[in-house]
Image (cartoon, helix red, strand yellow):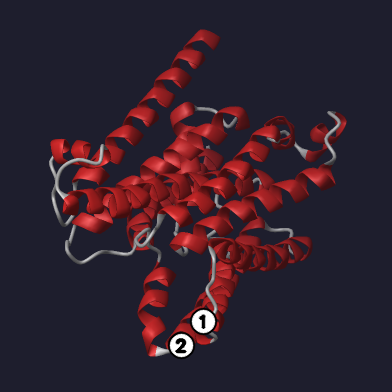
């Protein structure tokens, strides 16, 4: 049985890696300007047409790498929140964490634009983190009052609606020159990513992932209950605080650069768990990262090409593919309880 499980894990990891490489290639080749594989290869080596080099190296590469990186980060954040709340519906978007980060980033961007201040990547991540922590703080306060997880999820959704409404009002009254950029960002998009932004996002995400891996054993114990984790020597208070900080940093980084992206943090961890038939953090953390990258690369490809040259918001596409997964998950869980 153990040998079969190990074989399944290897096959699943290889399949996710192969899908990731395939989608990286397709996102490089396919677009409003179609480029052949030879032209892409020449562009990567700095040869060939100058226009093709600019498209591949300055537009498509940063965008596709950002989609893979930030999609993976959002999926890992969702898995951490599901572990924290012991609920598969918990996620950065549903709990209002992404919306809180979006509100503070929008306010910061508008203030900086109005006063001619250049907002660097670190400032955007910091603003998003503050917004994420504020929303998370409200959710945690509500969790102390509400014993029902369903009511807590509803509370998180309401927080998200409030933050989104305030953000929309703020964007509406922003300067005309800023409305277009803020509006596109507020809907969710990987467009406009530069190498500098990608570098800042990659450093932040990779540091958070390293600390997440260090928490894999306490997470395994915590999944079996607080009492068991405490008996295994886990400091529950520090562990919960670390999990909150890491999930907030990952969700905030995604929101800072790509805006709010829906359903990735809920749907992808569930799909990965079903694929691997396991919820062990040591397996799920890398699997969720790969799965999130695959999911967001696929959705970004659809967003760019389905109605080209018009581009859809990434959050709309992830909702189309992610929402049915969540509905299916809820129905299967209910049918299991009925049995």
At x 67%, y 39%, the residue is 211
How far across and down, in percent of the image, does residue 79 sit? 57, 44
Residue 173 appears in the rendering? yes
The crowd level at tag 2 (other Cα within 10 Å; few <14, some 14-19, many 20+) is: some
In the picture, measured across the screen, residue 87 lies left or right of residue 42, that is: right
Q: Nearer the viewer, residue 168 or 145?
A: 168
Q: Nearer the viewer, residue 1 or 252?
A: 252
At x 26%, y 39%, the residue is 44
The crowd level at tag 1 (other Cα within 10 Å; few <14, some 14-19, many 20+) is: many
Q: Any mark on residue 110, and which? A: 1
Above or below, 135 against 216 in this view is below
At x 39%, y 52%, the residue is 322
> Residue 280 is drawn in which quadrant?
top right
| C-beta proximity under 8 Å, tags 1 and 2 | yes
In the picture, measured across the screen, residue 321 lies left or right of residue 48, that is: right
Separation of residues labelled 1 and 2 (CA atoms): 7 Å
How far across and down, in percent of the image, does residue 189 sit? 37, 62
Q: How many marks?
A: 2
Q: Nearer the viewer, residue 64 or 118?
A: 118
In the picture, measured across the screen, residue 32 lies left or right of residue 95, that is: left
Q: Nearer the viewer, residue 100 or 58?
A: 58
Above or below, 305 against 65 in this view is below
Q: In the rendered image, which residue does mark 2 sit on?
A: 174
Above or below, 52 against 234 in this view is below
How far across and down, in percent of the image, does residue 244 sit? 70, 52
Residue 95 appears in the rendering? no
At x 74%, y 58%, the residue is 147
Say which element carries label 1: helix
How far across and down, in percent of the image, does residue 227 sit? 83, 36
């Amino acid at each position: 049985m153990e040998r079969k499980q190990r074989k399944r894990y290897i096959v699943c990891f290889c399949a996710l890696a192969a899908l990731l490489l395939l989608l990286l290639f397709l996102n490089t080749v396919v677009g409003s300007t179609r480029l052949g594989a030879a032209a892409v290869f020449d562009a990567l080596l700095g040869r060939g047409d100058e226009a093709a080099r600019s498209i591949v190296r300055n537009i498509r590469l940063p965008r596709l790498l950002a989609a893979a990186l930030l999609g993976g980060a959002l999926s890992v954040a969702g898995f951490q929140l599901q572990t924290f709340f012991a609920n598969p519906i918990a996620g950065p978007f549903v709990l209002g964490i992404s919306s809180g980060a979006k509100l503070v980033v929008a306010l910061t961007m508008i203030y900086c634009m109005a006063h001619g201040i250049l907002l660097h990547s670190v400032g955007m991540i910091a603003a998003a983190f503050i917004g994420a922590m504020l929303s998370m703080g409200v959710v945690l306060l509500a969790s102390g009052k509400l014993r029902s997880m369903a009511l807590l999820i509803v509370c998180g959704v309401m927080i998200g609606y409030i933050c989104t409404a305030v953000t929309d009002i703020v964007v509406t009254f922003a300067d005309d020159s800023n409305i277009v950029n803020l509006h596109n960002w507020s809907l969710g998009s990987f467009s406009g990513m530069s190498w500098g932004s990608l570098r800042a996002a990659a450093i932040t995400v990779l540091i958070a992932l390293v600390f997440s891996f260090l928490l894999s054993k306490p997470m395994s114990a915590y999944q079996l209950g607080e009492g068991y984790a405490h008996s295994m020597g886990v400091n529950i208070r520090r562990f919960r605080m670390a999990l909150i900080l890491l999930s907030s940093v990952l969700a905030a980084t995604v929101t800072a650069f790509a805006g709010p992206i829906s359903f990735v943090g809920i749907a992808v961890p569930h799909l990965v768990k079903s694929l691997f038939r396991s919820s062990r953090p040591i397996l799920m953390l890398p699997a969720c990262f790969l799965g999130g990258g695959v999911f967001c690369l696929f959705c970004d490809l659809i967003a760019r090409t389905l109605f080209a040259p018009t581009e859809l918001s990434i959050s709309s596409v992830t909702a189309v593919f992610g929402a049915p997964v969540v509905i299916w998950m809820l129905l299967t869980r209910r049918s299991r309880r009925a049995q």
